[in-house]
Image (tube, rainbow, N blue to C red):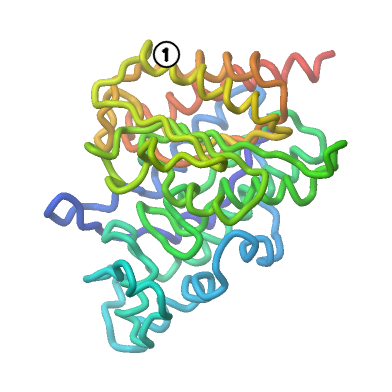
Amino acid sequence: MKVVHSPHHIGHNPPKEFISNHVEAYGESPERAELILEALMDTPDAEITRAEHFDLRHFYKIHAPSYLEYLQTAYEEWVAAGLWPEGIMPEFFALGHMRDRPPSRSPEGKAGFYMTDSCTMIVKGTWEAIRFSGFTALTGAKHLLRGERFVFSLCRPPGHHAGYDYAGGYCFVNNAGLAAKFLQDQGELDDTGSIKVAILDLDFHHGNGTQDVVQHLENILLVSIHGDPDYSYPYLTGFTSENTTKNINYPLPPGTNDNDYFLIFREAIASIRQFGAKYLVVSLGVDTFEMDQLGNFRLSSGIYGLLSGYLINELPVPVLIVMEGGYNIEFLAKNVVSFLTPFLVQMKSIKQK
Ligand SMILES: [Zn+2]
């Protein structure tokens, strides 16, 4: 099974974030991706490959041009204006009608316009890392189109909180949306003349960015299982009342255990099967783990392999897994490998035939 990664993520290494009324070390650290990569290097049947280059036009299919231009120039503009070279952290936010008109020309104004929180700092190497994180997702999608059945894209920074024209929650470009759109555009048309792609978001936090991105696209369904926003980030989205023909939310309460989760997971898989997806993109976050500091579920390490094993049996379509969250450094790689193991085993048996 191919595992796609890029070393460029290392340049995105913000020193800090503002969370829950205090400043602390940036939780979405380069160490996360390195630990997962190291574990996969030691895993038989994981074939490690580098991300290829792609034209940025793919990014423009899912994000607003003004937002992508901001991401590319934000840091230089910020520093040229004499602001802190350490990085960009907004100090206020554009609410309601303030988003109906373009932002002011000031770097502070743009930061408040294009960012939704103060835990998503932009530093000198951020754009390069974002670009290659997107390329990592696109390379994975390309491998699927070349005939691979399952591929893992070790994206960093993650992407599912990045919306059509905003960053947030450690995310800048929506990697899952990028891959889904690429699969739809480049895949072979079926009898209906369109290609349906589903995104299954398993990160603990609601994929508010992906939900926003899919509203601008056709025939891409997002199904998200996440912590109830009455208790968890991003607090304002992820309710069932937001469900449309383009997204289905399954918010779950604090303390959700393996059994509760598995029941809902089966429902989510059934809804994807009913939709008739030709490809599946999984946004994999393992911050649903019982000891993750950013989640409040009680899932054990053992559940991840059961979930992916069930998915393989019930959904016979090519699957791209893209990395999202997971912050317990001690268990992160173990839980990711646990989820990937049924895919690795299946790929090995396909290749032996
Ligand atoms: Zn998360």
Residue with the most extreme left position: 21
Where is residue 99 shown, x and y percent of the image?
A: 38, 72
**Res 309 quadrant in image:** top right
Please tell me whether residue 312 is drawn above or below residue 142 in the rendered image: above
Q: Quadrant of the N terminus?
A: top right
- What residue is shown at x 31% (from left), y 77% (from top)? 85
Residue with the most extreme top position: 259
Where is residue 176 shown, x and y percent of the image?
A: 57, 46
Residue 155 falls left or right of residue 198: left
Residue at disc 1, CB closer than 8 Å to ligand 1: no
Please tell me whether residue 86 is drawn above or below residue 144 in the rendered image: below
233, 214: nearer the viewer: 214
Where is residue 173 shown, x and y percent of the image?
A: 51, 58
Where is residue 38 shown, x and y percent of the image?
A: 50, 35
Q: Please state which amino acid type lies under the numbered disc 1.
A: Gly
4, 286: nearer the viewer: 286
Q: Can residue 338 be seen?
A: yes
Residue with the most extreme right position: 191
Residue underneath mark 1 = 302
158, 93: nearer the viewer: 93
Residue 147 falls left or right of residue 19: right
- What residue is shown at x 54% (from left), y 33% (from top)? 200
Q: In which quarter of the image is the C terminus?
A: top right
Please tell me whether residue 123 is drawn above or below residue 39 in the rendered image: below
